[in-house]
Amino acid sequence: MRALIVDDDFYCRSYLQEILHPYGYCDVAVNGDEAIYAFRRALSEGKPYDLICMDLVMPEIDGHNALREIRDIEQDMGVAENDGVKVIITTVLEDNVDTHNAFFLGGATSYLVKPIDENVLLGELRKLGLIDQAA
């Protein structure tokens, strides 16, 4: 698995990287602008991400706008909708509007509220088929 962790908080990035590292390669970005750049570069190099864990509230470009841009890039590069990157929104926001926007306007795959529980995250990865059921 190849993952991109996008969060402006150092602790959150480090914690997610610690959880995901045993299951694959992890890159990090501190805002939506860096995420878009990393995603476009990985896709154009033929090494697309399987997973993006993205915070919603970040400087520069927030998670909502970054996710929409990532989905636009996939469309422009001919990635089939079912083959797109799995995106787990990780945020402290428990707002129904944010949940709705992330799923229906941005194309998020899943939504987890911080603080992230390791077992819950790994359960999501299993459901998405990104790690083995035994892991």
Image (cartoon, grey):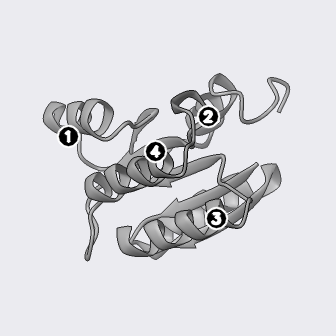
Q: Which of marks 1 and 3 is nearer the N terminus?
A: 3
How many angstroms separate mark 4 from mark 2 (CA)?
A: 11 Å
Q: Which of 85 and 15 is in front in this view?
A: 85
What residue type is disc 3 on? Answer: Ser
Q: Which of 89 and 69 is in front in this view?
A: 69
Indicate which disc residue 44 carries. Answer: 3
Q: Mark 2 points at which residue?
A: 83
Q: Mark 1 points at which residue?
A: 98
How crowded is the residue under tag 1: few (<14 C-alpha within 10 Å), some, or many (20+)? some
Q: Is mark 3 on a helix, strand or loop?
A: helix
Name the spot of residue 93 as percent of width and height, x first: 23, 46
Q: Mark 4 points at which residue?
A: 75
Q: What element carries label 2?
A: helix
Q: Which of marks 4 and 2 is nearer the N terminus?
A: 4
Q: Nearer the viewer, residue 62 or 71?
A: 71
How many angstroms separate mark 3 from mark 2 (CA)?
A: 15 Å
Looking at the image, which residue is at 27% across and 63% down? Answer: 62
Mark whose residue sits in front, 4 or 2? 4
**Disc 4, disc 2: CB below 8 Å?**
no
Looking at the image, which residue is at 29% across and 39% down? Answer: 102
How crowded is the residue under tag 3: few (<14 C-alpha within 10 Å), some, or many (20+)? few
What residue type is disc 1 on? Answer: Asp
